Image (cartoon, rainbow, N blue to C red):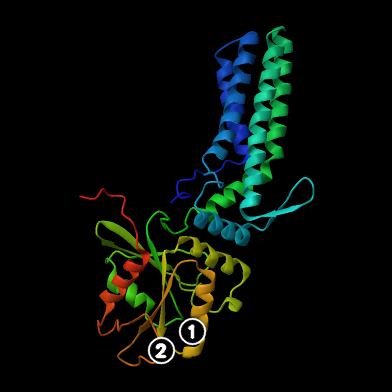
Amino acid sequence: MIFEALPTTPRSEELIDKAFSRAARTGRAKSGVEAQQSMLQTAGNILSDNLENVVTEWPDFGVVDPFYRELADAVLRREMGTRTADDGTEQTGVDALRASLSEVTWASRQVEEIQREYNAKLRKTDAETARKHRKQAFARMADVVEEIEADLLRVGEARDALRDLPDIRPDEPTIVVAGYPNVGKSSFVNAVTRADNEIARYPFTTRGIQIGHFERDHIRYQIIDTPGLLDRPEAERNDIESQAASALAHLADAVLFVVDASEACGYPLDAQLDLRNAVAERFDAPVLTVCNKSDRSRDVEADAYMSVSEGENVDAVLDLAVETVDWESDLPSR
């Protein structure tokens, strides 16, 4: 997953202490102007390189798959609130994170500029003046790093918020399973996928998102049940949950909407179909209506009928989903 390997973001105080303590050790090995030059170079390199690394370790949100970008935006909006820019405008989500990363880049370049400025000064002076110049450079570098303390904190908080998102692969054909609770979604996913299904943390649901996998014709499919998102009407979701549901729309190649015509799930059939229609409006992918518990009732017009509990027609429903996805393999034909 693209956010999983993000490193810990240093605090400004931690970074300054690291740079200056190593510079001091470097300076003790030399004397005179050369010692001050060595200290300046060591501190400047550590600060600028570490700040640059904070930024380059993050993926470019301009090219991140739309699913993960929108999901990340929803997570950050929920977890981190707003950032006030220099012009007074408020930024949220990915926009706020990108602004903080931009400030860290600015700080890295400022440190480099200070280093170049004082390197030139140190070449033209005596040891005592060189020491004063080096101390001035350190003070200015520290001011720059301290100025972006809030941005470093935001980047670190963003890393903590995003690193445990579920490992969903946008490059794999994906079937999203939707429908009201207790209609048999999880039972279907368990029935058609491998035994190592993942129950992953998902920041918008009271239960874990269920991710299963299966293979057809050497193609690996992922099938996803998202309790807490696509199992209730839009009006019952808050703005962040609604955005997370929109993120899934970027991911799905087909949606299986499971209904229970017997209404044993506890929800009237009309309400289930209204939710089905709302899901169909949100998703560009084809939405298949699947009537589960067909041994109890088939009193609904559906694309397929099955009974997971009785093992009836389950594989046929999966076949229909694969046919609907119509995924073209990258493998050369024989």
Q: Secondary structure at mark 2?
A: loop
**Considering depth in this image, is 26 or 55 the residue closer to the camera?**
55
**Considering depth in this image, is 207 or 285 the residue closer to the camera?**
285
Mark closer to the chain start, 2 or 1 = 1
**Label 1 CA crowd tier, 10 Å (few <14, some 14–19, many 20+):** some
Q: Tell me which corner region of the image, top left, top right, bottom left or bottom right, holds residue 145.
A: top right
Q: Is 221 positioned to the left or the right of 180 in the image?
A: left
Q: Is residue 267 visible?
A: no
Q: Which residue is mark 2?
A: 300
Q: Is 27 positioned to the left or the right of 120 in the image?
A: left
Whole-percent x, y for residue 15 in the image: 60, 35
Whole-percent x, y for residue 292 in the image: 35, 84
Whole-percent x, y for residue 8 in the image: 52, 44
Q: Secondary structure at mark 1?
A: helix
Q: Is residue 181 above or below residue 48?
A: below
Specify the farthest residue to the right: 87
Name the residue: 68% across, 29% down. Answer: 110
Please give the label number shown on residue 273. 1
Mark 2 to mark 1: distance in Å?
A: 9 Å
Name the residue: 44% across, 64% down. Answer: 252
